[in-house]
Amino acid sequence: AAAAIASPPPAAATPPAAAAAPPSAAAAATGSGGGGLTRQQAQMHKLRDANAKYKNLLKMAKERIQGQEEELDRLRSETKRGREDLATEKIRNAELKAANDAMMSGGGAAAVGNGG
């Protein structure tokens, strides 16, 4: 009984019909038989799954890029508006300074800048 446990049964050998068949018949049985189609179908399934994943990734990347472009456009618009506001404020400050300087040099003690 111990000898039977220690030595496992031999591996399944090739069936005698397949061993006796000519090489072309054996190739036809394994290459284009049911097993070959199953492998091909499995490979096609894997390729379709991979293709679907890549399409999904591409769609997500395009959506992300679109969102980033929209954000860039918004930021560019804000920057442009900020520059225009800054230029307007510089002009207003220069006008107020000129008016203030004129009043100060004219002998007036009051400075301009009360929001008017």
Image (cartoon, grey):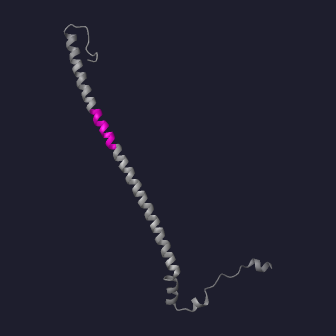
From what the image shows, is residue 71 above or below residue 63?
A: above
Give the residue at x 63% y 85%: 13
Q: Quadrant of the C terminus?
A: top left
Residue 107 highlighted magenta (yes or no)? no
Q: Quadrant of the N terminus?
A: bottom right
Q: Position of residue 51 (x, y in %)?
A: 43, 64
Q: Position of residue 81 (x, y in %)?
A: 28, 34
Judged left or right of residue 21, residue 66 is: left
Q: Position of residue 65 (x, y in %)?
A: 37, 50
* Tally of marks: 0
Q: Position of residue 47 (x, y in %)?
A: 45, 68
Magenta segment, prevailing SS (helix, strand or loop): helix
Give the residue at x 61% y 90%: 16
Give the residue at x 68% y 82%: 10
The extreme right residue here reads 1
The residue closer to the viewer here, 2 or 52, is 52
Judged left or right of residue 111, residue 38 is: right
Quadrant of the rendered structure where residue 105 is? top left
From what the image shows, is residue 53 above or below residue 41?
A: above
Q: Which residues are magenta?
A: 72-83
Quadrant of the rendered structure where residue 50 is? bottom left
From what the image shows, is residue 100 above or below residue 48?
A: above
Give the residue at x 50% y 72%: 42
Residue 75 highlighted magenta (yes or no)? yes
Judged left or right of residue 77, residue 55 is: right
Judged left or right of residue 35, residue 16 is: right
